[in-house]
Amino acid sequence: MTLKLQTPTHTKTPDTVNWYFKNRYYWIFSKAKLDNNMMPISFPTTRHTRHIMQAIVYAQNRRITPEQLAAVFTRSGINRPVDDLARMEKMLQHGNLLITAWDGANLVGVARALTDFSFCCYLSDLAVDREYQKNGIGQALIEQVRSAIGNDAMLLLLAAPSAMSYYPKVGFEAVANGWIIPRPSAVAA
């Protein structure tokens, strides 16, 4: 038995692909219910994951628990003191800008920052669940932070060695004029 393959009569051109994503984006905005500071943002799925992703929803200063923060840190691979929930609670209480990314009821990303909203903002944590990485969520979290702090504040961070190649891709520039006093070794991570 021989199978005859047919050439598709419709090919996707850049115009039809752009039309699809523009209309998908419009549909999500027109159909989504907005709560407080939550903003639905759609992105094209660029790779297969085990999860069927809905529109990722970003929220500013939505309360999360220390357990949720520790879980997303663990799933992202970021090195944080996830076994010290009291410390996680302090991190949540004293940071003054928290952007979260949600796939339905699942917390899949977080950007936690300290800022004066006028001169500088330190992005202390940027974490995205490994199952959701490489889909633009980290970049969207950074964009949400930048939007929240405004144009007068600079955004700075300390990058983990494994993330050094990521940050230039999303607009950060390396600086040579930074200094650090590391935390005492008794307080790890």
Image (spheres, helix red, strand yellow):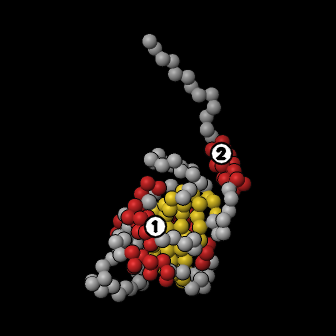
Is residue 24 at all visible to an observer of this figure? yes
> Is 143 or 11 nearer to us in this picture?
143
Q: Residue 106: percent from the left, percent from the top?
A: 51, 59
The image quadrant of residue 180 is: bottom left
User: What residue is disc 1 on?
Assistant: 68
Q: Is residue 89 left or right of residue 19?
A: left
> Is 124 or 73 nearer to us in this picture?
73
The image quadrant of residue 16 is: top right
Q: Is residue 158 left or right of residue 152?
A: left
Residue type, label 2: Tyr
User: What residue is disc 2 on?
Assistant: 20
Is residue 136 at all visible to an observer of this figure? no
Neighbor class of circle 2 (other Cα within 10 Å; few <14, some 14-19, many 20+) is few
Contact between marks 1 and 2 (CB within 8 A): the answer is: no
Q: Residue 11: percent from the left, percent from the top?
A: 61, 34
Give the total of numbered labels: 2
List the single residue furthest toward the right.
Answer: 30
Quarter of the figure with the N terminus: top left
Residue type, label 1: Gln
**What's the residue at 50%, 55% (across, down)?**
135
Q: Is residue 113 above or below residue 133?
A: below
**What's the residue at 54%, 58% (across, down)?**
105
Tell me the SS state at disc 2: helix
> Is 4 or 87 nearer to us in this picture?
87
